[in-house]
Amino acid sequence: MNASSKIEGYSFDNKTAFVRVDFNVPLSETLQITDDTRMRAALPTIKHILEHNGRVILASHMGRPKGVEEKCSLSLIRLHLEELLGREVKFAPSAVGQETSRMAKELKNGEVLLLENLRFFEEEEGKPRGLNPDATDEEKKQAKKDLKPRQRAFAEQLASMADCYVNDAFGTAHRAHASTAIMADFFGEEDKMFGFLMEKEVRAVDQILNHMERPFTAIMGGSKVSSKIGIIENLLGKVDYLILTGGMTYTFAKAFGGNIGNSICEEDKLDLALEIVEKAKQKGVSLVLAKDAKIADAFANNAQTDYADTENIPDGWMGLDIGPKTIQQVTEVITQSKTILWNGPTGVFEFDNFASGSKAVAEAIAQATQLGAYSLVGGGDSVACVNKFGLADRMSYVSTGGGALLEAIEGKVLPGIAAIQG
Ligand code: AMP
């Protein structure tokens, strides 16, 4: 993936830009925004276009509506967007239609039009709704096929409102939806581009996968091997050190014949764990598995605690974080690395008593970064970790895209990126 800054060089003067953003912000029960990070992340792109005399149509999804649902309406975020932008934001009560097209046409330079939730239309995702619950697989397949031309027409309608297309929604780049990929077909090569956020994400993945300096260390954590296997396999061809921590530690310890007490374990993945160990050997990757664990007699922050070797955990106890020997070992590896990727906590970091391992990893990455390493942190919980420890701004890049980042690291072509890069 190679991304030069096309948006920087593009002339938005007197043009309408369709900007696909990710405004899928979490809302409280009373429908108040609880975290506006995703909205803030899109501001540089929106402001750039407005400051360069362009007009902006903003489109996003929110939640997983099954049709029109008030609690998923983007009208809920309009006022906050006005505050963030310091200007009026017009609202189109439907993503497409005559009224919306008219509002788009009447936009003046420097004005913003926010469209209603794209996913109020089944055409956005291309997933048929209202199917008979008894529909056969064949019928479901046919319904999906029947929806395809309408999905394309929906994408064309969205595209018809604008002169250029800007995709700044990295979080949905792994989806081939109307607004994230298909509508790019209706713009010439020169009129479609990434927004600033998406450019940064694409560059970060490119840096990690294609331009890394060695030693390259990946730290994988989280709860399960099964959800990380695609990434682990792709990384085995690239990294020098692979540190596997978190809940998956115990699937490996069990596969080696150890006693893991009540620790989390995927019994059906024991063979897979041994295959990973073998593959790492073949590829010359130094696999670092946790030697010791901080154990608990219950899954609770205030449980009794102790330390044990990961292959020798007493019955009735469970490993909820890495222990001091492992902390020392991973810290040494990380601080000597020149490229670092971190996905997934080393333990149940949500409990303060089991957060030390994740905190030590975050601190070691911050230290290595200060010494000139490139560090990318991404994928859900590790982002929450660096935020919890106040270390986010000491990483080279903290990704905003959970699933999309993981698929990119797995080496998959993301439809939202391919639609622009070709
Ligand atoms: P994932 O979404 O797969 O990255 O998993 C993240 C979750 O894994 C976090 O909520 C952690 O609390 C959890 N986790 C990490 N280590 C353990 C462990 N040893 N036992 C149980 N859960 C864990």
Image (spheres, rainbow, N blue to C red):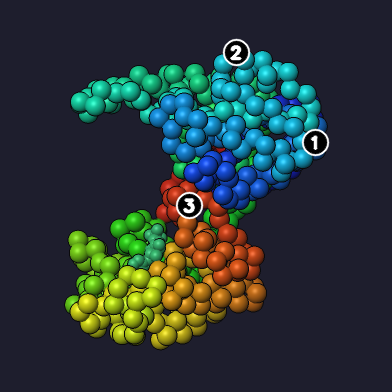
Q: Position of residue 24 (x, y in %)?
A: 53, 41
Residue 52's mark?
A: 1
Q: Position of residue 389 (x, y in %)?
A: 56, 70
Label 1 Cα neighbours within 10 Å, binned few <14 / some 14-19 / many ≥20: some
Name the element at disc 2.
helix
Q: Above or below — where is 52 with respect to 304?
A: above
The answer to which of marks 3 and 1 sits earlier in the sequence is 1
Q: CA distance from mark 3 to mark 2?
A: 35 Å
Q: Amino acid at mark 1?
A: His
Residue 389: numbered disc = none
Residue holding disc 3: 402
Q: Specify which label sits upstream in the sequence, 1 or 2.
A: 1
The local secondary structure at tag 1 comes to: loop
In this rendering, position of residue 384 left or right of residue 122: right
Total residue callouts:
3
Residue 213 in view: no
Q: Taking the image as four quarters, which one is ligand 1 found in?
A: bottom left
Q: Residue at coordinates 53% horizontally, 68% vertically from top-left?
A: 340
Q: Give neighbour class at mark 2: few <14, some 14-19, many 20+ (Cα, 10 Å).
A: few
- The residue under label 2 is 98
Q: CA distance from mark 1 to mark 2?
A: 28 Å
- Residue 66 screen position, x and y as percent: 40, 30
